[in-house]
Image (cartoon, grey):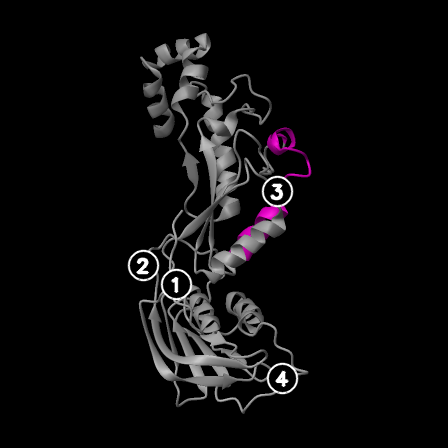
Amino acid sequence: MTYMYVKNFSGGVWPLPWKIHYDDTNHTINPGEFHFISKVGSCDVIDKAIERYQKLTFPLYDPATYSDSPATLTSLTIEVKTECNTKVPQLSMDETYSLSIDKEKDEALLSANEVWGALRGLETFSQLVFQPVRNKYRVRTASVKDGPRFPHRGTLIDTGRHYLSLSMILQHLDVMSQNKMNVLHWHIVDSEAFPYTSEKFPNMSLLGAYTRAHIYSIDDIRKIIDYARLRGIRVVPEFDTPDLLSHCYNTKGEINQLPNIIDPTLPANFEFLSEFFDEALSLFGDKFMHFGGDEVESDMQQCWENNPEVKKRMKDMGCANTNCLLNYYWRK
C-alpha cells in the first residue's frame, strides 16, 4: 500500500498546474450574485459546464441564511480562441488554459485555445473557491497557466466481468472530470459477458450478457459518450480479439463451435469483424479502439492446434504454426 502526504490548505488546486502564483489576499463571493460569463457564443460544452460549476463551485449555498461582507469578485469571463467543438474530443485536443484572479479586479478571466481547456480551467476555479465558515465563500487570488503533462490520462472499467449500471458509469465520469482525467478506457465485453448491443448483430448481447437486464443499449452507450464529451473525456472501447470477443459467436453473431477464439482461416470471420468494428467505430467516434491481443497463447493451443480443420487450412495457407496464423490475423 502506498501513502501520499498532501498538505491541507483551503483553495488548493489538484492536479498541480504547470505554473500557479498565489497572491496574499482572498476575494469574497456572493454565490447568488456571481456570474459565469461565456464569450464563446452558442456552445453546449460551455453552457452545460457553467450549469454544473454553478453548483459545484458553491456547494451547500443557502440563499435564505446567506450573510457576508460585500462581494469583491462578481464574475468569471470565459474566452475560447477557436470555434466551439461539438464533436467528441480526440487525442490531439488542446487542454491548455490560463486563469487570472486579480486582487485589484472584480472580474476573473479564463482563457483557452479550445473548449477542452476551458473545462479544465473551470475545474481549477472551482477548487480555488473555499468556505472559511458555513455559507460564506472566498476565492484565492491567483494566476494560473496550465496544461496536461500527458495527453492520455485515463481510468479503465471492465463491464465484461463486472456489470456497472448506467448511473454508476456517469458518476465515474464526474469524478474523472474533477480530477482532469480525459480517457475512459471501457473494457466493455469479455468472455464472461457481452453486454454491448450491436444493431447489426443483436444476438451477441442477447445470448452473451449475464441477463437481459445487464445490457447496454445503443441509447445507453450514446448517453455515456455524450456525457463524457461534455466533460472533455474520450471513451475508448476495448473488444478483445482474436480470443475473447468470439468465444460464443460465429459470423452471424450466433453460438460458435470454437470455445474461446476466432478462426482466422475462415474469410467470412473477417467480413463479420469488419462490419462489427465499423459499426462500433461509428458509434464511439474516437479515432482509437483497443483490440486486446492478450491471453492469446493458451487459447491458440486449445482452439487452433487441436482443431484438425483449422490445422488443415493453416497448412493450405502456408502456416507451419499458430504464431504464423496469429501474425496473419493481425495483418489482416
- Tell me which amino acid carries mark 4: Tyr
N-terminal of the pair, mark 3 or mark 1, is 1
- Where is residue 68, by image quadrant? bottom right
Residue drawn at (43%, 60%), measured in percent from left and top?
180
The residue lying toward the viewer, choosing from 132 and 96, is 132
Crowd around label 4: few <14 · some 14–19 · many ≥20 (10 Å):
some
Discs 1/4, front = 1
Looking at the rendering, the stretch of residues picked out in magenta corresponds to 203-228
Count of labels in the image? 4
| Disc 1/disc 4 C-alpha distance (Å) | 31 Å
Tell me the number on the disc at residue 149.
Answer: 2
Q: Secondary structure at mark 4?
A: loop
Image location (x, y in percent) of residue 155: 45, 49
Image location (x, y in percent) of residue 221: 58, 47
| Disc 4/disc 3 C-alpha distance (Å) | 44 Å
* Residue 332 visible in the displayed image: no
Tell me the number on the disc at residue 66.
Answer: 4
Q: Secondary structure at mark 2?
A: loop
Quarter in which the C terminus is drawn: top left
The residue lying toward the viewer, choosing from 165 and 205, is 165
Asked if labels 2 and 1 touch by Cβ distance under 8 angstroms, the answer is no
N-terminal of the pair, mark 1 or mark 2, is 1
* 134 lies above or below 268: below
Q: Which residue bears the numbered disc 1?
A: 6
N-terminal of the pair, mark 2 or mark 3, is 2
- Tell me which amino acid carries mark 1: Val
| Disc 3/disc 1 C-alpha distance (Å) | 39 Å
N-terminal of the pair, mark 4 or mark 2, is 4
Residue drawn at (31%, 67%), measured in percent from left and top?
18
Crowd around label 3: few <14 · some 14–19 · many ≥20 (10 Å):
many
| Disc 1/disc 2 C-alpha distance (Å) | 20 Å
The residue lying toward the viewer, choosing from 152 and 197, is 152
